[in-house]
Structures are given as structure tokens and as C-alpha cells.
Amino acid sequence: MDRDTPITGLKGVGEKTQKLFEKLDIRTVGDLVDTYPRDYDAFREPEKIRQAAPGEVCAIHGVVRCITGEKRVGNLYILSVDAGDETGTLRLTFYNMPFLKKTLRRGGFYIFRGRVSGSGEGCFLRMEQPKIYSMEEYSRLAGHLVPLYSLTKGLTNQAIQKCVRQALAGYVFEEEYYSQEFLRENQLLSRREALETIHFPTTTQDLTQARKRIVFDEFFFFLLRLRRNREEDGQLPNRYRAADGAPADRFLEQLPFPLTGAQARAWKEIREDLAGTWCMNRLVQGDVGSGKTILALLALLTVAAAGYQGALMAPTEVLAAQHFETVRDYVEKYGLAFRPVLLTGSMSAREKRRAREEIESGEANLVIGTHALIQEAVCYRALALVVTDEQHRFGVRQREHLAEKGDSPHVLVMSATPIPRTLAIILYGDLSISVVDELPASRLPIKNCVVGTAYRPKAYKFIAGEVAGGRQAYVICPQVEGDPEDGPEMASMENVMDYSEKLREALPGIRVASLHGKMRPGDKNKIMEDFAARSIDVLVSTTVVEVGINVPNATVMMVENAERFGLAQLHQLRGRVGRGAHQSYCIFVSTSEKTEVMERLKILNKSNDGFFIASEDLRLRGPGELTGVRQSGELSFQVGDIYADAAVLRQASQAAEELLRKDPHLELPQNSAIRGYLEEEGRCTGIRSI
Ligand code: ADP
Ligand code: MG
């Protein structure tokens, strides 16, 4: 059994399970082994009832006092039981488990584990459908870390665990690509140990070590690739001089708003590059809403007016479609020199063919799309500029591919990731950087609130009010669909499908639609178009809307389970509102009301500055936190986090520099495995796509 063995090579995985795995993007045994747990459930020592924090999963060691009620609602059988310890009482509710009435002995001691709800104010703490353990059973689990995988309906955590165990046992591990010396110098576990441990750690220390190796690899190969490109490319001459600034100036005069000071500075830098001696390789870094798109359009327009082609590559179909619409509107309104064409994976074969023909003949001078732009069949006539929006979403490889399409075109990448200069130099070492550190003055600051779930009815009323006033709202849930078999951990997570239903009931007459990453691209586009055209009032979505979506009429962003997201990601989500002239609002709903959680979220109240938020988040969490929230929706490696793992990033950067200094072309025999891995197609692009 090796990387490429189909998943059906595992015992117990038939066609049905294979289909389920496919939904999780797992096709081979290698895919499975590379799909790390998204979190770990630590079976902590039982707590006293008084110490149990509402919203958290707790284990309580209590005695069964009495059965307080049993009833039947429809085909649901509900049993209520009171359990207690010397500090208080816990009310337990069980659904459809009539046998418990006999098996739970009064006066018997058990450990109940589940999510605690309720508060001290005169009512009991509660636990719904807790798992019940005897003390012996629990002590066997206590202190262990149980891996929690991302699930899909029909595939339980336990089933995945079993498959992973089987896979690891029979897996022929690839050759270790680092030398013993390298491992020792960098204090890394072997790849094999790291993989086994990341799936089934015994202690948090083990997990930290395993995680470090995996994060190191992600960074190391990402950086190696980056450095190697830089060496190979060197500085190229500008083959596409586009010195005439008049078309861009005319466009700017017609725009209803002036550029901000920061936009103007960045534009000057870009313009000088386009007209200069050397080929442009520039990163535009600017917070969400700082107006980066206009800069891209100005550059593309300048190139198009000089008779060349430009390409604008977006990370999602939705975003590509949106950029296309924007450009089309501008062309109609201001008579720009663009002949735009859209090219995305979901277009029909005929549409694609037409688009490709226009690109090849040079009829189209602005090509907008997703990574369909870099697929083999597309030939450009005179590609002079490639802009990648939210570039971190693409592997470096993909960027290379697009650049290879032309003959060393200018490259402009745009990112909203707020990172300190020192990290920017490591991560974007090959690029010049323009910073757009100013928001358009016309914006009203967004009003924020961080609330518990009890606030929901008020929030719905508020949304209804905004909709009545002609505005629109987003509601974000962390999951696509729920599964009643999920453990307590997952059950408290809102999901798009059920939430949309709930909202339709709560907001009669309001048009609610759902959007998530598992939908077909065409369907996603349709929903986004309808939302932009205001034929949808409230969009319930996963974080697919996080990247770049611009619907200025939307004024409410409500995020459910806000505690599950990194602050930087919440900040990105917040960036979806406050884009127009209307006052906008963010409602962050937290299921956990623990003080640390609320404190962390309240940072969002204090500031609208992405950089400040990212650094505060890191300060509060401390570096190297194992799992939990994803720090940033951007520049996200599969496991590594550029903020929290900054120390590993620096280490990997040094190791990569050192390696290339000694062996620039990786020709030495001891480095052949590293080279092999680096050159393998589709691997170690470092950055994951959504
Ligand atoms: P981002 O930097 O997040 O990509 P966008 O380019 O999508 O931001 O711009 C957000 C909104 O701000 C758009 O509706 C855009 O038209 C508008 N905008 C851009 N620049 C300015 C400006 N100088 N003044 C006012 N509005 C602007
Ligand atoms: Mg943008």
C-alpha cells in the first residue's frame, strides 16, 4: 500500500464509503494520511459542577439523584435526569434512550460528558445527550487526545479513525528526504513519526513535535520553490513598455471618487514599473476594502491601451465572475479600452472554446478567470501583465504557470494579509511591495457587537429592519451540513443547511438563500449574482464569501460560532460589509461565553485594523497553539500559520537559504530526495486552495 493506492484498497471501504471520502477530497491512501485531524478532543479530568463553563464540553463526575421527567413529543422520547456533586446539580436530557430509565441507577456514580448550557441564575446547568462513562471507562480515555476529522454526512469520526489506523499500519512510508544531520540540526521528528503522531498523539508534547515537523515541511518547500524561482528568473528586462498614462488618467477623472493617498502612491509605483527598464514583480498589500481592485484595473488598462493583453486571476469562480461584471460595467459606463472575456472551469465546453479563440486571436485584451486561465489549452497572443487577486490562495506553482503562458510578463499580486515586514520579506522575498494603508474616507466605521446565542432573536429583528430598508445581510456558519451522530463537539456548530431553514421560519417574507463550497461552481455564481442583484436578501454561507466579494448594499454580517474562527478571518468576513455609503454592522455570535473567548472576540470591537488584530490575536493565544481556530483565511498553509508559527517559518527560511547556498541546484546526492519532492507535480505547493 503506498500513496497512490486507491482508498478502496483499505478493508471495509467499498464503493459507498469511497464516494463519501471523495466528498472530503480523499481518493487515495496518501490523501487520507495527509488529511490531518482538524482538532483533538482531550478527555480532561472531570470537573466540579460549579466550575463547569456554559458553552464548553465538560466531563462531570456525579451521582444520579432522580429522574425528573419523561415525555413524548411526536416520535421523540425525552428523559430528564438530575445528577449532582457536592457543588451543585446538573440537569441531563436524553432523547430516544428509554432504556436509560432502567440502566441509570439512582445513587450510582457516572461520568457525564457533553456541552454544558444554562447559567447560574436560578436555573440548573444543563447537558443534552451527554455520553455516559463508568469511572473505569473514563480513566482509560482520560489524558488521551482523540483526533477529530472533518466529516461529511454518513462518515463518522470513528470510521475515519479506523481507516487512518489501517492506512498507517499498511502504508509504505516514503523515503525520509532530510538527512539525519538535518533532522538533528533543526530538531525535527522523522516524517514517519510525525505522520503517525499527528493522527494519534498520546501527549500534547508529542503533538507539538509532530506538528512542528509538518509545518516545517510546508514552509520549507514553499520557500525553496520561491527561492529557486528567484534565482532562475533574476531580474528580467521590461519587454512590454506601457508608458502612456493617458488612458488611466482619463479613467481616473471619470471615476466618481478620487484615489486615496495610499492608492495614489501605489499606482505611481505600478505605473513606473510598467514604463520602466525592468519587468514588474510587485505585491500590493492592503487591508480589506482599501480598494485594490481599482489599482489592478488601472494597470490592466494601461497595458491594454498599449496593445497588449492582461490577465486577472481570481481564486474562486464567484470572485472571477464578480470582477468580470465590474469590468463590463466600467467599459459600458466609461468606454474603457477593454475587451474583456471570462474563462472559468464551470463554463460549457463551447463557451470555453469561444473564449480561448478570442484570447488566441488577441481580440480579447483582458482575460478574467480562475485557474482555468493557466490550463494548457489557453494560448495568449501578447500577454504582458498577470494580476493575481488574493494571490496567497494560489500555489506558487500556479503563479509560475500563468507567467509561463506569456513571455515573462509583468506580475502584480494583490493580498489583504496583514503581515509584518520581516515576514513579508521571507514570504514574498521575490517581490517589491506597495502598501495601501488607508481606507476611502467616505466609509462609516462598522459597528460591532460580540454576543451570546440568547441575542439571536434581537439580531433577526435587526436584520429584518435592515432588509425592510432595502439593505442585505450575510450570516456565516462554520459547517455546511449537520449530522445528528456528531459528538458534542460538532453538534454545537451551526450549519448552513439547517440554519437557512431556521432563518426562513424566523424571517417570513424575507428571501433567504444558502451558499457553500460544496455547491457546483455554476450554482454558486448564480447565487452570488442574485445576491448582488438584490433578489436575495439574506445569504447564509460558509466562509466562501470571505474572499474579496463586493456587494456594497450588504450592511449586516452576522457570524455564528464566532469562537471557531481566527480573528484575522473574522476581520476578513467583516470586510464584506461597510463597502458602501450605508452604516454597516457586524454581529459576532459566540456559543462559548467563557471569558477568554469573549475577550478575544472583543478585540474586534476595538479596532478595524487588520494588522493590529492579527498581532493581538497572537499575543492572546501565544505562539504555537496546536489547533483550533485557523488564524487567517489567507496565506493559509494546510497546518502552518504564518503568525503563530513565525518561529518555525524563520527556521525553515534559514534552513532553505543554507541548503541553497551549499547546493544551489540541489545536485548533491544527499539532496536528491528533497529535489524529487520539490519537483513532484501537485505537491508541496504549500498553500491550500479552498
Ligand atoms: P479590496 O481592497 O478589499 O479588494 P475593493 O477593491 O473591492 O477592495 O474596493 C471596495 C469598494 O471600495 C469598491 O466598491 C470600490 O469601488 C470602492 N472604492 C475603491 N477605491 C475607492 C476610493 N478611493 N474612494 C471610494 N470608494 C472606493
Ligand atoms: Mg479585493
Image (tube, rainbow, N blue to C red):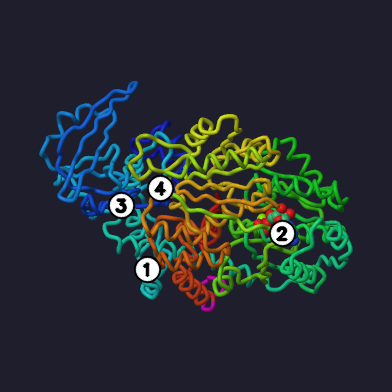
Of label 3 and label 4, which has the lower sequence position?
A: 3
Residue 154, picture quadrant: top left
Percent across and percent down for residue 485 are: 35, 35
Q: What element carries label 4?
A: loop
Magenta segment, which residues?
Answer: 661-668
Mark 2 Cβ and ligand 1 under 8 Å apart: yes
| In the foreground, 661 or 617 | 617
Front disc: 1 or 4? 4
Local packing at callout 2 (Cα closer than 10 Å; few below 14, some 14-19, many 20+) is: few
Percent across and percent down for residue 364 are: 82, 48
Residue 597, picture quadrant: bottom left
Of label 4 and label 2, which has the lower sequence position?
A: 2
Local packing at callout 1 (Cα closer than 10 Å; few below 14, some 14-19, many 20+) is: many
- State the mark number for residue 591: 4
Q: Is mark 1 on a helix, strand or loop?
A: loop
Q: What element carries label 3?
A: loop
Mark 4 Cβ and ligand 1 under 8 Å apart: no
Q: How many labels does the image show?
A: 4
- State the mark number for residue 160: none
Residue 254, picture quadrant: bottom right
Residue at the spot 34% in from the left edge and 21% down from the top edge:
74
**Which residue position holds label 1?**
188
Of label 1 and label 3, which has the lower sequence position?
A: 3
- Mark 2 to mark 3 CA distance (whole Å): 43 Å
Front disc: 4 or 2? 2
